Amino acid sequence: MRIIAVLEVDEEKLMQTGHSFEEEMGWAVPSGITLKDYINAQECSVFEYAAFAWNTERQEYDQIGYSTTTELLCRKRFQERVRKGWIPSHIDAANVVFKKRPVSEIYGRWTELEQVRQ
């Protein structure tokens, strides 16, 4: 089984142990849990952007459309949806917020595929 997990690390406490993150993760090895790869989320430089408009029925913000890789594209796509009338009537398009979030990617090792005979 392969699980992707997000860990919160208190760097001050970690420094007090005198060990690295990798060394501290070693405690899980006897349980059959091995740290394969990780990325520091604070060093993430890739973001995705999305528009959220107020849903008058549920009284909360709903994401409108798909996320995008740039803020400008996100704003333009939202404007296009409004202009073309693609916003449902229970969504208040005048009450919109734009949000971003960091994106981290973890890549596993490549495995060769079986040859397909034609």
Image (cartoon, grey):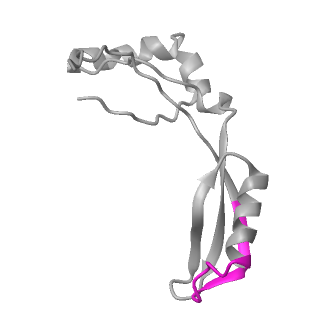
Q: Position of residue 28 (x, y in %)?
A: 30, 20
In magenta stretch: residue 49: no
Taking the image as shown, residue 57 lies to the left or right of residue 100, namely: left
Give above or below for 102 relative to 40: below
In the picture, the quarter occupied by the C terminus is top left
In magenta stretch: residue 84: yes
Q: Position of residue 93 (x, y in %)?
A: 70, 80
Q: Residue at x 44, y 11 (%)?
A: 23
In the picture, the quarter occupied by the N terminus is top left
Q: Residue at x 54, y 21 (%)?
A: 14
Magenta extent: 83-98
Q: Residue at x 60, y 54 (%)?
A: 67
Q: Nearer the viewer, residue 44 or 85?
A: 85
Q: Position of residue 76 (x, y in %)?
A: 76, 62
Give above or below for 51 relative to 92: above
Taking the image as shown, residue 71 lies to the left or right of residue 61, namely: right
Give above or below for 97 relative to 94: above
Q: Nearer the viewer, residue 74 or 96?
A: 74
Q: Residue at x 71, y 73 (%)?
A: 96
